[in-house]
Amino acid sequence: MVEVRVETIEDVARQALVRHGASGEAAALVARAVAEAESFGNRICGLYYLESYCVQLRTGRVNGTVTPEVTRPRPGIVAVDAKFGFAQVAFAAGLPEALEAARSQGIASLAVGHAHTCTALGHFTRQIAEAGLMAFGATNATPIVAAPGGKRRVIGTNPMAFSVPDGQGGCALHLDQSTSAVALGRITMAAAAGEAIPEGWAVDAEGQPTTDPNAALKGALVSSGGAKGWGIGLMVELMAAGLTGSRLSVDVAPLKAPEGPPHDLGQYYILIDPGTAPEFAGRLAQLAGVIGEDPGTRMPGQGQSPAAQVDVPDALWAQAEGLAHG
């Protein structure tokens, strides 16, 4: 392992993205997301994805120079056509108008369509909460989850995120979780390390439970909580694909494949102004207080702070520097 400052990770990621064809603005926004993921220990959404971003910039699976198109078909609805570019760029383009819409209407939606994978969905809902609004986010992904009792991959890990402002520019509650039992990256990492996975994460190609990560990669993941998680995953799918005009997960090629069609994924956000309910701040404080009275418990995301320096595997850091400098 090598210790690296998060600001250095962001700078190296930005240089790598520019070197492979991204505009300065796009590179800065994506690099910020990469660095933030590393700072919170979310390795799967950090430098782990940098090589894929760079390769796909070169092959055209993602457009690193496109300008998203922002429209507002109704007072409380903001839509962004990412034009097969980075989700971070499309979100940044639509966020100011979505914030204004939510503040003026009390509630608004921000639909980002035809985008590259957003990776860490909480990166986006966190920004909304830091601006003082509650945020719910949903996105889909390449198919990897089978229906309960089935074996066909139908939906992606289909994460959802929820962030609540603390009234001081931070988050009082922040969660970002897949609706599958585990993120796909945990399976691929286990396979690379030659480690078994817990039973209940996946099924093999015949639909049977497995602890072999390689068999899981040939089979499918299962939903968190069985049928309950499956239902939430379908809800996320319809929001992310149906309300943004993007592809259903079943039609999306593997996200890290170097070549192929653009991801064409959707991200859907609901922004709520808690100021419309005078009792909200008090109820939030009461709930946090009750939870805090129980030793060892906390609100999701509470107490987490970004690290200024993190440990990065030697090979991964060498790869990042190679992408940035050749």
Image (cartoon, rainbow, N blue to C red):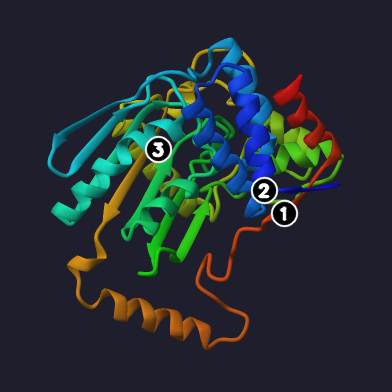
In depth, the one of 70 and 262 nearer the eye is: 70
Amino acid marked by disc 1: Gln
Residue at the (78%, 33%) spot, across then down = 214
Amino acid marked by disc 3: Glu
Asked if marks 3 and 2 touch (Cβ < 8 Å), the reply is no
x, y (%) of residue 216? 71, 36
Is residue 133 visible from the viewing direction of this image? Answer: yes
Above or below for 202 versus 93: below
Residue at the (68%, 45%) spot, across then down = 43
Q: Tag 3, which secondary structure?
A: helix
The crowding category of the residue bearing disc 1, from other C-alpha atoms within 10 Å (few below 14, some 14 to 19, many at least 20), is some
The quarter of the picture where the C terminus appears is top right
Dividing the picture into quarters, in which one does residue 282 lie?
A: bottom left
Asked if marks 2 and 1 touch (Cβ < 8 Å), the reply is yes
Residue bearing the label numbered 3: 237
Amino acid marked by disc 2: Val
x, y (%) of residue 19? 63, 19
Residue 47 located left or right of residue 80 = right
Q: Tag 1, which secondary structure?
A: strand
Say the numbered circle drawn on residue 6.
2
Residue at the (62%, 55%) spot, across then down = 40
Residue at the (36%, 21%) spot, across then down = 67
Mark found first going from the N terminus, 2 or 1: 2
Residue 24 located left or right of residue 222 = left
Mark found first going from the N terminus, 3 or 2: 2
> What's the distance in space between the residues labelled 2 and 1, CA to CA?
5 Å
Dividing the picture into quarters, in which one does residue 241 lie?
A: top left
Point out the residue furthest to the bottom here.
293
Say the numbered circle drawn on residue 309.
1
Mark found first going from the N terminus, 3 or 1: 3
x, y (%) of residue 9? 68, 41
